Image: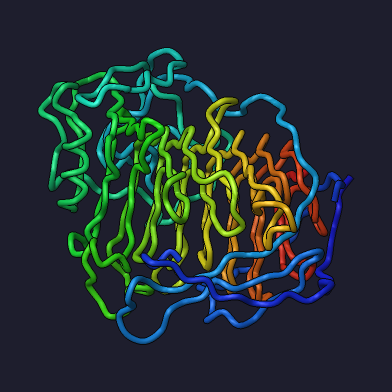
Amino acid sequence: MPFQSHPTTGRGRGRGRRWAAALGIVMSLAGCQSQEPSSGDAGTGGDGSGGGPRQGGESSTGGRATGGQPSGGSAATGGRASTGGRGATGGSATGGSSSGGTSGGTGGKATGGAGTGTGGKATGGAGTSTGGAGTSTGGAGTSTGGATGGGTPPTNGNPDGHCAVPAEAAAEDVSHPTTVVGNGTASSCTGAAVVAAVAKGGVITFDCGSAPITIPLDQTAKIFNDKGPKIVLDGGGKVTLDGQNKVRILYMNTCDQQQVWTTSHCDDQDTPQLSVQNIRLVNGNAKSEKDGGGAIFASGGRLKIVNSRFENNVCADTGQDIGGGAVRAFQQSMGLPLFVVGSTFGGAEGRGNVGSNGGALSSIGVSWTVLNSLFSFNKAVGNGGNPAEAGTPGGGSGGAIYNDGDKMTLTLCGTAMSNNQVNAYGSAIFFVSNNHTGNVVIDSSTITGNVGGSWYPKYPQISAFDDTPITVTSSTIH
């Protein structure tokens, strides 16, 4: 039956903590609710002195460095939560093979139209083919040389998501690439060529032959901050980058001096603007890195993800302040949202992304706008919450999304979350606004069958303070 909730004050009192790192890295009730959504004011966290009430734990803020150019990076802190029950896996994937073939053109999904529609104007050209359903996900490349072939990639995103995509969230134009990886053959598309192209910056496309391919990476492709302003990585719907369970796939950090400092305020600068589109990122591994992001780590500038797929990416299994099996983000310029459009995280059993917190997405002080996307079978496998309970390593919150900080907004539209799993809090979403200025907006979305954890004051599967505004319209949460 419909459930309507109203904000109440939280219990207890948290305390803040500033956390800095060397490279700027810093109900068991079923219910549906319909209300008019409020427009959240997206923003970054303050400078980290306030803490908010948390039932059974303490909180801290996502801070920002001030003043001149930092020596070693800007500051940010992790959230706090204590342990809950342990969930079990279950259910089947809601997103699998594509029907009707793959979309044509480098633009992939429609620009400005329905997020998962097959019509609309594509940036790079044609619409969809009339071929049969593609069920192969493509073979994982294991060699250190060129790419390997594969079957037709599955369709990305939530097939039932039809929310309008604003122009700024659409795929970028790639009609005039800076670098084309490959010369028309699969063997010409190597991991080394990808790394070099990313380092060069600009618009990057691929010419690896007509068949879908997987390109194994032996090292992380790193953005240089002086190679913008825009950097676009477009796989044309046929390219898979494979970290081979050895390396993170993409790295951008405006406060990493080795990647070139370009301003005196690296913690809040508007470039580089990285767009990752029409591509599949698999088997990225950041377990040896300091702060998560198995496929992508992005701190500073802007990041946008469009019509892409993330599978089997991992970061550290435990730790109270680490996360993002697929993507870890900090310090988006001016507090503007990080857009995720028409993309899939996991998508089937055995393909989910895994990390201590935020099986798919994790951030501190970042607003997200997630449109027409699918999150399933991702796992937050840490144990003990944040701060870690005695005798535990900490973590285990946010099966799909871990969103911590101060003034920030999480917006979901046309998005589906199912079969994600946690050990501590927020089997689908963990959202903690430490100064109680953040909000969540959920429209035309489904959040069902996510398992594990506790601390669900308003909605099942969503952990947040009692007084956090959560506006829900035309959605199912149970």
Which of the image's four quarters has the N terminus? top right
Residue beneath the point at 57% across and 59% down:
321
Asked whether 203 or 55 is in front, the reply is 55
247 or 334: nearer the viewer? 247
Across and down, in percent, residue 388 comes to 69, 58
* Residue 401 relative to residue 207: left or right: right
Q: Nearer the viewer, residue 264 or 450?
A: 264
Q: Tell me the colour scheme of the image.
A: rainbow
Residue 382 is left or right of residue 117, and the answer is right
| Residue 200 in sight in this render | yes
Residue 4, quarter of the rendered image: bottom right
Q: Is residue 457 above or below residue 423?
A: below
Find the residue positioned furthest to the left. Answer: 183
Image quarter hosting the C terminus: top right
Q: How many marks?
A: 0
Residue 87 is situated, as x and y percent measured from the top left of the image, at 75, 38
Q: Residue at x 16, y 22 (%)?
A: 187
* Nearer-the-camera pick, 154 or 200: 200
Query: In the shown orientation, is residue 70 left or right of residue 418?
Result: left
Task: State which quadrant residue 210 falls in.
Answer: top left
- Give coordinates of residue 420: x percent, y percent: 65, 38
Q: Residue furthest right?
A: 1
Instruction: Name the quadrant containing residue 149.
Output: top left
Q: Residue at x 29, y 23 (%)?
A: 213
Most distant residue in the front direction: 391
The answer to whether residue 324 is left or right of residue 88 is left
Q: Residue at x 76, y 53 (%)?
A: 83
Q: Is residue 414 visible?
A: no
